[in-house]
Image: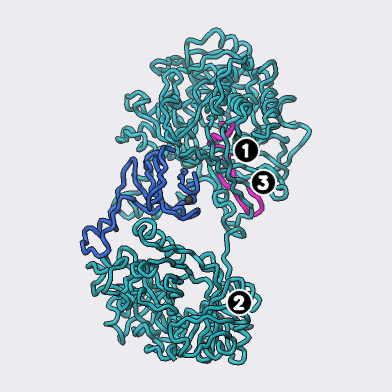
Chain colours: A cyan, B blue
Amino acid sequence: MSPRRTETGGRIDRLRTIRFTFDGAPYTGHAGDTLASALLANGVTLFGRSFKYHRPRGLLAAGVEEPNALVTVLRGEVREPNIAATMVEIYDGLVAVSQNRTPSLAWDIGALNQLGGKILSAGFYYKTFMGPVVGPLKGTRFWMFCEHFIRRAAGLGKAGTAHDPARYERMNAFCDVLVVGSGPAGLMAAKAAADQGARVILADLEANFGGSANWSGETIDGMHAADWAQRAVGQLEGNDNVRLLPRTTVWGYYDGNTLAALERVTDHKEVAAKGEPRQRYWAIRAGTVVLATGSFERPLVFPGNDRPGVMLAHAAERYAVEYGVLPGQRIALFTNNDSAYRSAVALKKAGAAVVAIIDVRADVSNEMRRLASDAEAELLAGHAVVATEGGKALTGLKVQRFDATGGALSGDERSIHADSLLMSGGWSPTIHLASQVGAKAEWDPARQAFLPPKPTQRRPNQQWIGAGAFTGSFSTAEAIAEGRAAGLQAAGGAASSAPLPVVEAAPGDPDPAPVFEIKAKGKSFVDFQHDVTAEDVRLAHREGFVSVEHLKRYTTLGMATDQGKNSNVPGLAIMAEALGKPIPEVGTTRFRPPYTAVSIGSLAAERFGDLKPERLTPMHDWHLANGARMYSAGLWYRPMIYGLAGETVEQTYVREARATRDSAGIVDVSTLGKIAVQGPDAAEFLDRVYTNMFSTLAVGKARYGLMLREDGLAFDDGTTWRLGEQDFLMTTTTANAGKVMQHLEYFLDVIWPELKVTVTSVTDEWAGAAIGGPNARAILASCVTGTAVDNAILPFMGIVHGRIAGVPVMICRLSFSGEMAFEVYSGAGYGTRVWEALIEAGKPFGLVTYGLEALGTMRIEKGHVTGAEIDGRTTARDLHLDWMLSKKKPFIGSAMMDREGLIGSDRLELVGVIALDNRALNGGGHIVEELDEANPHDSLGHITACCYSPALGKYIALALVEGGKARHGTRAFVSDPLRNRFGPVEIVSNHFFDPDGSRMHG
Amino acid sequence: MLITCPYCGPRDVIEFTYQGDGNRERPQPASQNLDAWNAYVYDRLNPAGDHNEIWQHSGGCRAHLRVVRNTVTHEILSTAFARGGHKTEGRS
Ligand SMILES: [Zn+2]
């Protein structure tokens, strides 16, 4: 038997032993244990090292608010850091390690920081490292020197680098009533709403529903509260209109009553069941939200309050009642309110000796005095703890007389021998979700807590109702009444006068004494996770920080992974005292999502990896079967090269491009954006959209067009085919298809609704193949029926209709490669059939298939632009496309394109670049004037696209270079220090090859 | 945030694309008034409160909507087709 495990009690299954390791050492626990309860049962007191001073830390809490006991859980290669041990359910084979210690938890060299505690006070980083460089080791330069060491020492767990193989899921859910929290208030609300027929979701971040009923030791309707809760859950389970979500943290509350929740589906399992994701992200749209999120017990701030063995009172009660684990054998309690007396009685009942109850209040009620004597505890009213003793575990504490009104200590210190000190500094409602949607918390001087606003003060688009401790009603009887009322109201039901479940509970006044801190010598911690002391808060005040927001940033109070769940109110109270202002005037900060840490995997859910959408052209399978190496372009997959055995990428594209220019090549162009522009005003619309004229285009002809943005910069280019008087087929670049569509729709819908035009995306309706080269026409002639393809019938930019392999096709004679070339379009479903027929017809001519690399090579040789040059910064003039700017009509961008900054002679213009050292150039390499490899300076521009040109036998590139045309024929240097490339280049025209177009005109 | 499309009904904001300040006025196409063009292309109102915006139901019917939205509370006060007609009033 574990040293601290009780004989009976709790919801653990003592017959089931679970084996796990912590920091490499084997331990056992029981089914139902958390890592925290199992280690505590094994006598482990030291769980972690603190963030800044590396002080030994034990468990403070039993739930989600735990600031100290953060661990890293390892699953194979995957490591998940910074999980509270209190939220890890143990399973066979669990491997967990502690954090922030070197070399081990027990012997930590970083603990030396404690000796230099003064140096590491609030604002240490700002003061020491920011500002001017004075000496050799001051200011920013000193920071650069120290950063490496400090970053390694100050920090939490390390994130892993291994690929996370887990699967995550996203779920959309709709309900009439979402109940957050499943304590007595939440259970009553869910039941009441469900009985009204409402669709209800009940979510709780714990593994077991019931909340405080699981450990309060109270009686509801004559049975143990825990049993009552289980019965209530059982009743809900049977309802079709109720969805129960245990292990589900509602972490975000957004406008329109949209909530985000994270369900930990398999984190507690040794092996996930088939099909189960690791975690599930729930996007919940709720009619009304019932917030029954309970409250957090606050620590008291006194010297040594962070020593392992000092714990929140209710947490100890939970460990004893829920898990059958005693945090110590000789327990002392330190409180400013009544709730700790119930904890004392519970721990006594569970078998611990309660040696003393130290109460800051001199005036303790008779009821509490009775509870103290039930616990057989010495009551020290009007006393306070001023010190704790022990190293990695508590051995004792010192108390002194205390005046709760003035905070003065008096009399002799008295030592008390104890191995566990439980503290209660009052309770703070868990108002985070309400705060996220903008509810302004109000300070309640009686409860000494921020309470959510009353319903009347809420805004109309956040429909929530609070119940139970969330509203500051800390008794179970109130929680039950408020829960039922909230459930009925949320479901639209009438208030009920039926009798409520009867609660038998220990008495107690919910209002604590307004005492947050005992000022005595020694470090008194406010924020345990970020190591912020009461003195740090006062120091911030002395240095002039008066706003609570500034205080937070300067001291980092409440900014760790626990987001100040324990520390917020004590920190504010100490700040308020320093300022000499009441707490409500100091104000509180607004909570923001997420409530707890959320895995990035759950946010991405299915939208990556195997389940990322893919766009495949109709000929995709043919490409794969014929040796294509595919390249992902946006969501599309396109052949990059069709490599032969033993070829490099460069050898392949050079072969493909050369064969195309020698005979013929064919490429899949199905990915080009295609938009049907139709209607009586289609031609007029295109005249407005393109810089050049389309109304003058004859039916059966195509024209190359350029679009600008409203600001006058180049936007997209492509050919548009006039298929009928009112029927155009526009093509766009692959990358811009969506943007162009949206651009056209915007103008038709918002700017020119009077134009009778419809635009339809038909990209996926057509398969496209571009066939080019000296023999392209002969190949077409041998397989096309129903039309001739000679120069008379099919001139440059002409369109004909015919058939290939019996399939209707549309053929347009246009060229991107600079060769005599044709684009053959067919219905997408027949794409492969037409493609195969073209391949077959090309065999006698040595037709090659080519991919994106060869396509790019031939376009660079021709000096055509793509998205690399139309990069959102270039104008039509920069790209030498000013011949396309019509002077006869206004068009989108025409008014703005001649602005001063867009027509200067210092703009980057499109040029060609030839490597004079016969070495490859790189995209992104800079062009510089001076031969200064070590210190390249004064960039003239940069390379946008590069290749080896088989037509020129040289490495060439397109570039955007200052001065542009004026530099043709001059020499410069390419500088690419990241890739160690420096060398001489010649700047030439971007039209490297066949500049007069004789090849494509034939 | 929910936006009520006059065609499709209330839909999640994820289906929509923000298309900018709905108060901008495009000068006549042939206008040479550079100040007016400059204001149209670059100036945006940024009120803390009710704002007239253009949204496209890009993941639905693709209509452009004129949406009056409170930028502080994200309340949608009204939606209507940008080309006119079918106005949906009322806070949501
Ligand atoms: Zn719609």
**Which of A529 and A699 lies nearest the eye of the viewer?**
A699
Q: Is residue A177 left or right of residue A914?
A: right
Q: Is residue A73 magenta?
A: yes
**Residue wearing tag 3:** A95
Which tag, 3 or 1, sits closer to the chain's start? Answer: 3
Give the residue displayed 61% in from the left and 49% down from the top: A169
Q: Secondary structure at mark 3?
A: strand
Which residue is drawn at the image coordinates 61% and 15% (left, top)? Answer: A498
Quadrant of res A524: top left
Residue denoted by label 2: A628
Region in magenta: A61-85
Answer whether labels 2 and 3 touch (C-beta < 8 Å): no
The mark nearer the N terminus, 1 or 2, is 1
Element assignment for label 2: strand
The residue depicted at 59 percent of the width and 48 percent of the height is A170
Reply above or below: A626 against A406: below
Amino acid beneath label 2: Ala
From the image, state whether disc 1 or disc 2 is nearer to you: 2
What whole-number distance in Å separates the C-alpha atoms at marks 1 and 2?
A: 48 Å
Using the rendered view, name the quadrant where residue A232 is placed. Answer: top right
Residue at 68% over, 32% down: A239
The mark nearer the N terminus, 2 or 3, is 3
